[in-house]
Each structure stands twice: as structure tokens, then as C-alpha cells.
Amino acid sequence: MSRQRDTWIHGILAAGLFITGTCVRAQELRPAGDNAALDYWKASALMRTPRTVEELEIAQFVNTVIVELPPRFFSVRPDIAQWLLGERAVIAALADGALKPNCDFAVRRGNSPFLNLEHLPYMSALTQYGLAVACAYEYAENFQGVAGIYYSLLKLAHNLDQDNNLSSGLRAAEMLQMIVSDMEGFMSRDPSAPSVAILVDFFRRVQSPVFHLGAYLNAEGGRFGRWLLEDPAQVEKKLAMLYGRATRKPAIDKLVTLSPERKERRLQDWVMNYEARMIRLANAVEEPYSEAITILRQLDEEKNEMKDNEDAPGVNPLIPLLVPSMEKVYQRFKLAEAQFDMLYILTMAALFRSNNGRWPVSISEVQGVSRAPLPDDPFAGKPFYFKLVHLRPRIITRVPRWMADEEKLVFSLNLAERHRNDGNRYEEALKIYQRSTLDPAMSDTQQPVRQ
């Protein structure tokens, strides 16, 4: 990426940082080769700390309630809007991070297989806070600023892929879902063409899938395998660390009576078999969904049988100890892929609306404004369900039953329903707020919640 293009992107991302429309000074732009993780730590550190009782009440409202409400609620709490609109330095640091291709949180600790993932809760909190700021920007009618924040937060979630492990990937998937849910509301309010252009630019730069489950599994298998073989004399101690407080420790029991030579050979066989199992999982998740889920279910069943018979001769105790159960983990990553793809399609649909004054009536019309082929539903292997409902798009991914029954998982984007529900939530929240001003002793449990 050239410096000229970096400057242009930074200008777009920072367009909403100053409500007066002041441009970001050129000397504030950082070199694109820097580590984005440093910008994200900086943004997290810059989040305002409450210093008074009033500011603490605002912070609690931001952290617990505002994510459930549409921007118009700020009309009754302009003090909270002002608090959030003052967080320009946080948003600037996020925008800096969005420019950089590398993101290294230094998760690895020498030769240890255990990773330093202390940044994950901070990044989740930063995402939630950034979404609250975006809500305030929308209230202030700075729509390009809103889109710039979404661009930065999407890039933050995408950058956690570089941690290359399951825990970071799952946390990033949770962050992505938060962003998807907020952007559904933003899109339901028919955003301006310039703000849509910023989001189109993001999706044209970042390819799906954004998370790479197979790479995570291969990396994990390699880390634990190398560590176990590093010093065979210490293997019982290492296994004890893995078992923790478990009452039964079959791997240790199977090694303790062996001579050093036989112990080392047994361990090598176990590790080779364990790494082969992780490679099988990694290869399976790269297959189409219908094939992958069949393989993973079979491997999960084999693992559970080994766990039930860990003491039996010939059973490799590292499999039940170290190999994750993959069916639902895989499906959760597939949902994240589907959410990203639905957001891509919705953004291209918004681009169509900007060009034509109406939402597209079919996914083929969306394809007409996309420079690349539209992604298929990763669960079904065919185009996403797309239909206009009350003149606004509805997009659905065909998830497994357990996901459809899970209220917290987003598998459908329905702009008409979201527009209606946001109006209802505003009216409900307004009534609760008006009652609370008359009755200060009103319980916090009466706060409005998402329908």
C-alpha cells in the first residue's frame, strides 16, 4: 500500500473525528509498517476513566445500556452523547491501527505452548466502547464518522486472526457479531452514500474468510507437540500441568513405570498420533460444510470413546487431553464467516441503493454493483437467502437448529424488522427514563432491553 493511498484511507477513517469537519493533520499519520497492536493498546488506554459520581453513572450507562438503544435516545441524554463525542483520541488510535497490515500482540512465550492472551478482554471492551461512540456520532449526524469507526472495528476483529489460535479467533468472532448487530441498525436507517462508500472500501480490501480455523489447529498441534518432546525427562511434570486438578491422569499412569528409553518412544508415538489428529481436523474444516461436519462428528465420537476408555491398552491419552471437540466450534466459525459475508452483501446492497434510490429486489441486482462474485452461504453452499421485506433487505444464513434456537447468535439481518424494533425500544426506553426522573429510587432492573 503506497503512502498516498494510506493518507487517503486515513482521511476517510478519521472523517468523523471532529464534528466541525476539521481534517486530520498530515503529521499525525503514522507509518503503515508499524504494529497495529500498539495502536489498539493505546486506544484501550485512552478510554476515559470516570472521576466523579456523575461520570461513573455515564460510564455504566455506556457499558450496559446504550448498546441496546438507537441513537435517537441521546436526545434525552445529551450529556452521554457529549461524553462519547469527546473520545476523539480513542477513535484516532483505532483508525491508525486500521491502516497497518501487521498486528502482533506478542502472544507467544518462548517455547511454551501456553499463550499470553491478556489483550482479548481489552479488545472486546474497546469494540463495545467504539460502537457506543459510533452511536453518538450517528446522533450528531456525522455518518461518515460512523462508517469510519465501523471500518476500524471490523479491521480490529480481522487483525486478531494474526494471533493464530482458537481463543483469539472465537473472541474475534464475538466482536464481529457485536459489530454486525450494530451495523444492521445503521443500515436500517438508510445511511448516506459517502458513509456507504467507506464500508464498501473495507469489504473490497478484506477477503472472506476472515478467520482461519485450520491454521489455528495446525499451530496448536505443533506448539504442544514440540513442547512435550522438548525434554522427555520432564514429561510427567508437563502432563501434570495439563491435567491440573483432575483426579485421574491416565497419561502419567501409563508412563510412570517405563524405563527412560521406552518412555521416550511411547511419548514420541503419542505426540505423532496427536499431531496427525490435529492435522486431520485442520484438513477437515477446509472442506465444504456438508463434508466437514460429517468428518468432525466422527472424530469427536472417536475422541469421546477414547475418553471413556483412557486406561485401555493402546489408547493415546493425549487425544482426549489435548484435542478439542470440534463440531460446535467449527459451526461457530462458519457462522462468523456467514455474518461477515452477509454484511458484505448488505453493504453492496446499500451501494446499489445509493446509486438507484431503492434497495435491490434480488441478490442478482446486488451482484451487479459488486466487483467480485458474491459469497455463497457457507452452511448451504448456495447463494444466501435474500428478499425485500417492506422495501428493505432481509438476508439469512441457513444455520443448524441449535444455532437457530440460540437467541444470542445473529444469523438473520432484517432491516425492516430492525427499524421497527429500534423505534419500539426508543419509546420503551423513553417511558422508563421519564418514570425514573420522577422516581429516582427506580430499580436498575427496569432498564430497557433488546427485544
Image (tube, rainbow, N blue to C red):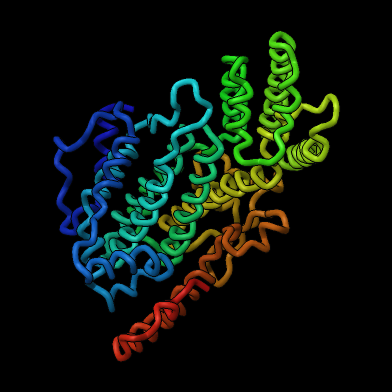
Does residue 39 sit above or below 418 in this rendering?
A: above
Task: Residue 283: give x, y in percent of width and height.
Answer: 69, 28
Does residue 190 sit above or below 233 in this rendering?
A: below
Does residue 427 sit above or below 12 in this rendering?
A: below
Q: Quadrant of residue 228?
A: top right
Seen from this angle, which residue lies furthest right? 313
Seen from this angle, which residue lies furthest front? 257
Task: Residue 441: give x, y in percent of width and height.
Answer: 34, 86
Quick one: 302 or 145, which is closer to the camera?
302
Task: Residue 260: give x, y in percent of width and height.
Answer: 69, 11
Q: How many marks?
A: 0
Q: Residue at x 45, y 54 (%)?
A: 179
Quick one: 361 or 256, which is closer to the camera?
256
Task: Residue 333: give x, y in percent of width and height.
Answer: 60, 44
Left or right position of 399 against 202:
right
| Residue 291 seen in the current view | no
Quick one: 276 or 363, which is closer to the camera?
276
Q: Residue at x 58, y 69 (%)?
A: 389
Q: Residue at x 48, y 59 (%)?
A: 181
